[in-house]
Amino acid sequence: MSLETPSRRKLLQLSGALSLLGPSMAPFALQMAATGAAAGLGVAPDYKALICVFQYGGNDSNNTVLATDADSWGRYFAARNTGQDPIALMPVGTAATAVGQVNPVTGRTVTSAAQPEAWGGVLPFTPKTAQAVPAGTKASSRTFALHPALSPLMPLFSQGRLAILANVGTLAGPLTKAQYVAKSAPIPKNLFSHNDQQSTWQAGTIEGAVTGWGGRFGDLVLSGNGANTIFTAISTSGNAVFLSGNQVVQYQSTTRTLPALAVNGVSSSSLLGSSAAPAILQSLISDISPASNFSSDYATVVQRSLNAATTLNGAMAGVAVKGVPAVPTYLNPVTGATVTNSLADQLNTVARIIAAAPGLGIKRQVFFVSIGGHDTHDAQNTAQPNNLSMLANAMAYFDGAMSNLGGIDMRSAVTLFTASDFSRTFTTNGDGTDHAWGGHHFILGGAVKGGDMYGQYPTLGVDSATFTNPDMTGNAIIPTTSVDQYAATLGKWFGVGTSDLATIFPNLQSYATPILNFI
């Protein structure tokens, strides 16, 4: 094991990220707020944006994208229709059962809206390309469905802008069950650790990584990205290693409707009753005179943050408010409450920054947004339907926003994709699921070859005396597609060259198909 000595430049990068956080994280009352009014003025012909939607906690893919052929469904339903609060979803075509009524499939009385019987059956979809039937599955063909909370995604899939990538996860190279059991091939470190797998998804290695593949994509486009390169990598979700590059410094913005950066008092006409105080405050926080290198460097970073905010706010103010629709509400399927979608709120900020790209002279941007609450060890029936409702609602909102951004259809220039720590165990632990491995993800955009499922959807079912699953070890499905392949395919679309992809993803050469065809 080797320890990297932090460089002064890397310390500044970290300081720069922290200086853009909210008041709970940064001194001098630095407070990020939302981008202001924005709309499109027309973008560079070769503009592209890549948006990572990270589902923190490990989304249960087994209840997100489901195989519904009788053989697969039988093993799924048997494994999950158990415990104190069963998490098995209802079959295709099953009507929602009202509270107090008996569900005809399970024979159970529905006691609350937080129960699969109350949501109706899963939503069937047919991929353009028939999925191969893997070993261990007796069906002659496979059929599929989405969780009932994902209904806003159905039109995106049928219209050809949404694709599904099946059974993707962190890998050190191609891996079979026999190799995993025999320990004859390398496997990712700390497989079931949240922090380590979040880092491996975002950066290719466990916690402690200093650069992520989104940031390294940003490094490669800096020279052609104009004068405002600080807006190359942008997070609306705090510091993310995904956006850290060797040269790129991630710009962090929160949401809402204020300017991109507000320092309390600096922009006011008076502070503490003094008209001179705002200018004095700005002088203090941007003072580079102290003898301490850290103090001097920190002040430099703060001044850079202020300057960047002024530039972004100016770009926002320079265009009319049109083309970025208001953040929608959505219906929480468990509580029935109509609430604002915090993920859509983040994507609203992304849309506004994309709209301001012409004024900034930016041709390539990488964004990071996130949604938490997926660590469903218990109460999964309460948490996951709401999380998936937020995801689907936000993705549909963003697709609509990109379809007419200041009069321009930007969907072919913008690709959004989901990621998560890992999936969850195939069986239930009573009312939830535990940490597992391979899962299924969504890719959205006008350049996406949508309406199809890519990768190999796995065999379902845990080993027993009469059944051996070639794709599962214990309760975890071994990925058949790596994060490296997923990321490299997105990178190629973004404009990253083959040799650079091989450098960023050194394991890529291990795969017979390093670049996938979903885009």
Image (cartoon, rainbow, N blue to C red):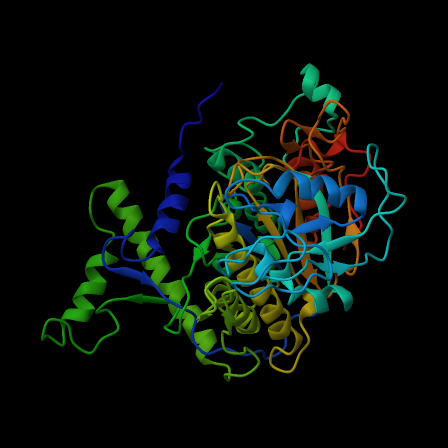
Residue closer to the observer: 54 or 436 = 436
* For residue 61, above or below residue 118: above
* For residue 49, above or below residue 357: above
Quadrant location of the C terminus? bottom right
Residue closer to the observer: 68 or 324 = 68
Residue 471 image offset from top left, x and y in percent: 74, 31
User: Left of 98 or right of it: where is 36?
Assistant: left
User: Left of 60 or right of it: where is 73?
Assistant: right
Residue at position x 54%, y 77% in the image: 324
Residue at position x 48%, y 44% in the image: 375
Residue closer to the observer: 90 or 61 = 90
Residue 514 image offset from top left, x and y in percent: 77, 39
Examine the rendering and report whether any part of residue 319 can be seen: yes
Residue closer to the observer: 195 or 82 = 82
Examine the rendering and report whether any part of residue 229 can be seen: no
Residue 246 image offset from top left, x and y in percent: 52, 42
Q: Looking at the image, how many numbered discs can be counted on the residues?
A: 0
Residue 440 image offset from top left, x and y in percent: 67, 47
Q: Residue furthest right?
A: 140
Residue at position x 76%, y 53% in the image: 144
